[in-house]
Amino acid sequence: MLKIHNLHAKVEDKTILKGLSLEIKPGEVHAIMGPNGAGKSTLGYVLSGRDGYEVIDGQVELGGKDLLELETEERAREGLFLAFQYPVEIPGVSNMEFMKESVNAMREARGEEPLSAAEFLKKAKEACKQVHLPLDFLKRGVNEGFSGGEKKRNEIMQMILLEPKLCILDESDSGLDIDALQVVADGVNSQRSPERSFIVVTHYQRLLDYIKPDFVHILADGKIVKSGDASLALEVEKEGYAWLGGKAQEADA
Amino acid sequence: MSQWLEQVIARGEQANLTGPRLQALTALKQQRWPTRKSEAWRYTSVTPVEQLELSTESAAPASPTKIAGLDSLDLVFIDGVLQQQLNTLSLPEGLTIQALTTLNTEEHSATALFAQIKPAHHLFGLVNDVLAEQGLIINVAPGADITLPVRIINLSSQGKESHVRVVVRLGEQARLCVIEQGEGQDPCLHTYFAEYQIGAQAHLEHYRLALHTGKALQVGGNHFRLLEKAQLSSTLVAFGSDLSRLDVDIEHAGEHAKAKFNAIYLLGTGETFDLHSCIEHAVPNGTTEENARGIVGDRAKAVFNGRIHIHRHAQKTLAELNNRNLLLSRRGQINTKPELEIYADDVKCAHGATVAEIEEKALYYLLSRGISRSQALIMLNFGFIQELINEIPNAPLANWLHDKLRHKFSQMEVK
């Protein structure tokens, strides 16, 4: 599914990723944890192709294709989905219009007919219910005036509608209370399948109680320094990142 | 002095003017032809007016654009000439509409109603005072609720100069909706000024669709006076042309009046649009909300001058003015100037102006969902003005504008 080899990337003049390698097979859930500044969010931005995040070395393949050669929108159409830590508010563009354009762009890329307004509305309503958002959210501007939790649920709703191959969840748990966390986790779990893979980026072990990972990786100073199973997350929760020693402190600085 | 203005004055002198029209002629003689040094015309050149070549050939018959689903009472002027016989119209009770030409032949000159609300400092307003032979006087009786919108359409054709004047008076507690729609693209000059008196507790829903474009020159104004507890909701939608200039004046003359003014301008390659608005809070307890938003294309130029004047006794005034602009090209230009003059101490007043380029974060968000770059740009930038379209209460009009503006926008390039 996803193969990252020796990835180096910089933002402006600062190198953030310093040789990150990771392989994810279909159906697997990988959690990435790590101290602030380790490069967790950068990984999501680099993979999705955000302007200003420059790859200086390494390779990334998604489903056998060279991901780094593709434009942002082409990567999305190849099935890469990034649930943002801080989703953008776009007043004036309704959630409905946004998601319909998006779903139909994906369908077009797969050679399918676009959904009619009525067909889309039906799907959107179901997804809306699944993440416990009131239906009038579809009419409102994209994320406009949504609370932190509503924005995160909106991301999960998009994930459900877009049916991606690889989902990257960037701190989808941050700022959520326990009920909202449950809704987000349920949404994610409902989408788990043998064909779909997940990268769950999180600061805390808590989310992983709800979304059980197959693997846990610790990212520090731009590369993966330790990998293990779910028990690694518990270890981190208990002991923090102090054992990383100099590396973590350097990244925090 | 320009030749064009001299010729206007000469025509005025031959016309045996009286009352406000005579005063306008006198004032006009003292006016200087604007140059880049004139504050009111600092960024917009009137040279195209002087260069306009008039034609005496009769124009091809034009017909006004239909707005699907809109039921309205249409009054059409082609090159300044009213096309309907008003006495054949059946009007809702409480609404009277008279043509300026008919009224002028009667004992009292209808032109005595001119310039009661429009301030005297607008140069082309004075020109219109002097030259407008055609127009409408519209009255709404106290308490009358006129649900059928009155649509005043001005069509301009090649080589024609036209001057139309409208005076509207709403009695106490009356309600009216007026849509003013101007269209033309060939070289021509059209001036259109409308004065509105909104009586106590009366409500006016107003639209000005200033859609002259290309080589068509349009200069005009909307001037509103609000009496006690009157309400105004006005929406301006403008394209640009070689010269397109509007002056909007809103005067709070009675307490507890509410004015809402939204302006949208969408300027294609090389077009110019200039909006000057002036809100006068002369009495306490008035509320004004003004939002002007524009998208400026390649080598296009927008001018926005928004003045709010709160007089010394106008305590408890609430006034907000906001101007947002989006430049689609480094070669586009926007000159924006909010001007606050506040002489009362117990008021809430806010203003702001922004000029933005495409927002990277929002664009990235849409791209990351598989939406193509060109479609994302349309969604983002159009969303910016769509917010104001969404506020239009008249649904058929809002839909029509949405399609028309979106179509124009889709043809504009982002550079």
Image: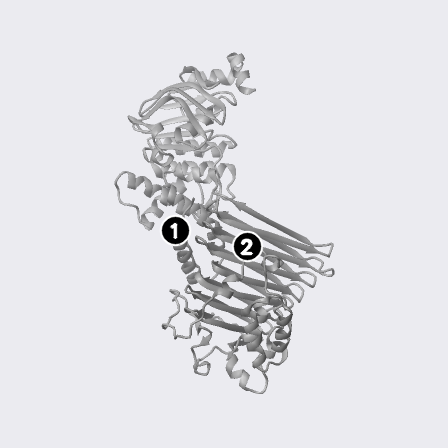
Please, which residue is most extreme toward the bottom here?
Answer: B107
Q: Point out which mark residue B303 bears.
A: 2
User: Which residue is depicted at the point 47% across and 29% down?
Assistant: A171
Q: Is residue A233 visible?
A: no
Horizontal and vertical percent position of residue A59: 35, 22
Color style of the picture: one colour
Which quadrant holds residue A127? Answer: top left
User: Which residue is depicted at the point 40% across and 34% down?
Assistant: A187
Q: Residues within 10 Å of mark 1 (few under 14, many from 20)?
A: some
Quarter holding the C terminus of chain B is: top left
B31 to the left or right of A3: right
Type of amino acid at the residue the image marks with label 1? Ser
Q: Given the image, what chain letter belongs to the residue carrying mark 2?
A: B
Which quadrant holds residue B341? Answer: bottom right
Q: Secondary structure at mark 1?
A: helix
User: Which residue is depicted at the point 38% across and 73% down?
Assistant: B59
Type of amino acid at the residue the image marks with label 2? Val
Closest to the observer: A70 or B413?
B413
Dot 1 or dot 2, earlier in sequence: 2
Q: Secondary structure at mark 2?
A: strand
Please identify, in this view, whether the residue under mark 1 or under mark 2 is nearer the observer.
2
Horizontal and vertical percent position of residue B287: 63, 59
Closest to the observer: A240 or B54?
B54
Q: Which residue is mark 1?
A: B410
Q: Given the image, what chain letter belongs to the residue carrying mark 1?
A: B
